Structures are given as structure tokens and as C-alpha cells.
Image: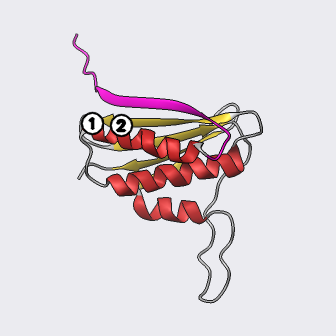
Amino acid sequence: MSEDVIHTHHRERFYRRERRSVPAAREFAREALTEWGYGSREDEVLLCVSELATNALLHGVPPGRGFLLLLRRDLGGALRVEVHDSGGGRPHMAEVPERGRDQAECGRGLVLVDALADKWDVADRDPGKIVWCEFAAR
């Protein structure tokens, strides 16, 4: 009996809880996308990487810990971005404010992720959570 195997491109890197981790994660993602020849939607993907990494640092990574960035592209061209952290709580999108009102400090990054990615969600992990987004092949 033969078994079909779906091969993927896979990259991951761990980042410490420090400000320079966000630009480092973005550059790591840029290098992976370039290596994979993923030119489609690169700017959207990199913005989502930045937003998810920033959210992890601000809200999901306890002192002394870090986050894992995982990138996976399947042979069909779909791309998945995951940020794993060990903090509690679940991220949520901020409500879009009426004109003239101040925006909420939390949740604006997920508004961008929701607008740019084809899908996103949060999955449980022990400890913490995985916030992920996906980009379909175009």
C-alpha cells in the first residue's frame, strides 16, 4: 500500500523577549520567503509576522521567556505563519473606533492580520497559545 506524502518547506526560530526580536523575526521570514521563491503577497506576510511577533512580546511572553516563529509552505503554495508563546490569555481584535475617537491600545494588530490573511485563529498550547494566519496560493 502506498502512502501519499505532502512535502512542505518549513522554517522555525526562537526569539527572546526583547524589542529587537520583532525586526529579527521579520528578516528571518523575508529570507525564508526569498529562498522559497514566494514573491506573492510578501509584504502582507511580513506585516502579519511583525504584528503577531509584537503581540507575543507585548501580551504573550512572560519575563525570561520567548516566542517561536514557525513558517510552513506546502507544495500547493499556501503559507502558514505561527507564533507560539507561553503566556496566558487569548488575543482579540479591537473594535474599529468611530471617527474622532481614540483607538484602543490592544487588538489593532489583529485587525490588520484579519484584513490581510485569508484565515487566522488561536490554538491552545501547554503552556500558552499559538496565534496563526494563513495565506492561500495565488
Residue 62 is left or right of residue 43, and the answer is: right
Q: Looking at the picture, does residue 69 appear above or below residue 91?
A: above
Instruction: Tell me the residue at 44%/43% (across/down).
Output: 27
Q: Do the residues labelled 1 and 2 touch (CB within 8 Å)?
A: yes
In the image, 46 versus 110, the foreground residue is 46
Instruction: Tell me the residue at 77%/38% (across/down).
Output: 63
Question: Secondary structure under badge 1?
Answer: helix
Find residue 79 and report its horizontal and vertical position in percent: 35, 43
Residue 68 is left or right of residue 106, and the answer is: left
Instruction: Tell me the residue at 55%/60% (across/down).
Output: 110
Instruction: Tell me the residue at 59%/66% (across/down).
Output: 108
Q: Can residue 122 be seen in this view?
A: no
Give the magenta part as a residue range. Answer: 1-19
The residue most toward the front is 20
Q: What residue type is labelled 1?
A: Trp
**Which residue is identified by label 1?**
36
Find residue 124 and report its horizontal and vertical position in percent: 63, 39
Question: Secondary structure under badge 2?
Answer: helix
In the image, 85 versus 17, the foreground residue is 17
Find residue 129 and report its horizontal and vertical position in percent: 64, 40
Residue 80 is left or right of residue 104, and the answer is: left
The residue most toward the right is 63
Q: How crowded is the residue under tag 2: few (<14 C-alpha within 10 Å), some, or many (20+)?
A: some
